[in-house]
Image (cartoon, helix red, strand yellow):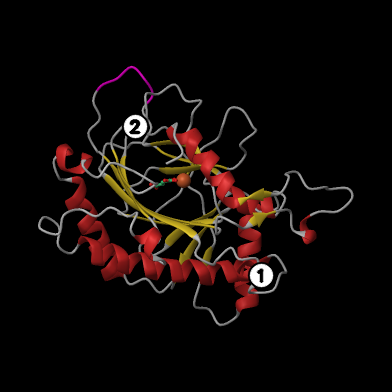
């Protein structure tokens, strides 16, 4: 198995134009890159992993009381299948979604484990959510520059006003029961929105397929770099850029070791209309997708993954 060598983008670099150029190249070539100096402290990330482990170690009965509603809460092992075409029963992972708390209505939709059992859980997750959101917003301004747009383009179109940002804790068990079927930690998929910022506990398993239409598919490992986020472009960004920026297929394979990861999905505000950027189409390369309202698109993608829209 070949390991990919992805570019490293420094979010605190003073030369924004040079960072934007590197991002442009990375997004055109692969849709994946590393992000360093992103402002999220390693201690906070370590705390998030500690609390995540505490939660997933609880009895299933306790976790099931927080079963996912309105895209928030717990999803048990094998319940989700990211690749509807795969023949496996379901992905060998459990997860927990935390959504925006920018306004009271949204904040109230979140579910939290009992403070008696996990007292530091909620403040840790809220603090991480705020920090990674702020890194994500800074990254989006560099992505705008990378597309030769104004730095605040995505703000101006309303995408970052109360964005549909979801934090998702993931746990892939190390031991797998014997089965005749293929088992995936996360089956092949592309992410839905603008960008994803991913951290893991260093256990390998993440792979990308750079040419989704080529058969047989070639999968390459994405190595972990301590302290760096792995960033990938999502499908709505691919639509905005008329496939100039690639939303790359990826998956997680079980390795026999227990893997924890934390994904932050930064999606546009639900009312944002995502339509081909003027700079990404011309007469010989017309828009490949019709305009779509972000909320409608995301709802449909969730429905296809979960069989329900919440
Ligand atoms: O856990 C990982 O490394 C990747 C997870 C992922 O791709 C996803 O949840 O969309
Ligand atoms: Fe993903």
Q: Which residue is mark 2?
A: 79
Horizontal side of residue 16 vs 287, given as left or right: left
Magenta segment's dominant SS is loop
Say whether residue 247 is visible. no
Q: Residue furthest bottom?
A: 14
Indicate which disc, 1 or 2, sits on the residue closer to the N terminus.
2
Which disc, if any, is residue 222?
Answer: none
Residue 293 location in percent, x, y?
63, 50
Is 17 above or below relative to 161?
below
Q: Which residue is mark 1?
A: 153
Residue segment shown in magenta: 178-182
Residue 227 location in percent, x, y?
36, 65
Give the residue displayed 61% in from the left and 28% down from the top. Answer: 215
Separation of marks 1 and 2 at Cα, in angstroms:
38 Å
Q: Nearer the viewer, residue 10 or 129?
A: 129
Answer whether labels 1 and 2 touch (C-beta < 8 Å).
no
Q: Nearer the viewer, residue 144 or 12?
A: 144
Give the residue displayed 54% in from the left and 39% down from the top. Answer: 300
Mark 2 crowdedness (10 Å alpha carbons): few <14, some 14-19, many ≥20? some
Give the residue displayed 56% in from the left and 58% down from the top. Answer: 268
Say whether residue 173 is visible. yes
Give the residue displayed 42% in from the left and 32% down from the top. Answer: 81
Could you say whether the residue bearing mark 2 is in a helix, strand or loop? loop
């Amino acid at each position: 198995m070949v390991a990919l060598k992805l570019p490293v983008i420094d979010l605190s670099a003073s030369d924004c134009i040079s960072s934007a150029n590197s991002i442009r190249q990375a997004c055109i070539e692969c849709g994946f890159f590393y992000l360093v100096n992103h402002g999220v402290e390693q201690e906070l990330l370590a705390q998030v992993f500690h609390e995540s482990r505490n939660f997933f170690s609880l009895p299933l009965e306790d976790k099931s009381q927080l079963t996912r509603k309105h895209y928030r809460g717990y999803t048990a092992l094998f319940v989700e299948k990211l690749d509807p075409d795969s023949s496996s029963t379901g992905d060998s992972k459990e997860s927990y979604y935390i959504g925006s708390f920018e306004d009271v209505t949204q904040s109230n939709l979140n579910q939290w484990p009992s403070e008696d059992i996990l007292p530091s859980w909620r403040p840790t997750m809220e603090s991480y959510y705020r920090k990674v959101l702020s890194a994500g917003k800074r990254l989006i301004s560099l992505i705008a520059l990378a597309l030769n747009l104004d730095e605040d383009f995505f703000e101006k179109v309303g995408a970052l006003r109360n964005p549909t940002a979801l934090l998702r804790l993931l746990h892939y068990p190390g031991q797998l029961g014997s089965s005749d079927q293929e088992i995936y930690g996360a089956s092949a998929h592309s992410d839905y929105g603008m960008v994803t910022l991913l951290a893991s506990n260093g256990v390998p398993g993440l792979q990308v397929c750079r040419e989704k239409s080529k058969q047989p598919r070639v999968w390459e490992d994405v190595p972990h770099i301590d302290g760096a986020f792995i960033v990938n472009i999502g499908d709505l960004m691919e639509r905005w850029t008329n496939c100039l920026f690639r939303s790359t297929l990826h998956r997680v394979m079980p390795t026999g070791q227990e893997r924890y990861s934390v994904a932050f999905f930064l999606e546009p505000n639900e009312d944002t209309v995502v339509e081909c950027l003027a700079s990404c189409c011309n007469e010989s390369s017309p828009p490949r997708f019709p305009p779509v309202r972000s909320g409608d698109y995301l709802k449909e993608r969730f429905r296809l993954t979960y069989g329900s829209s919440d």
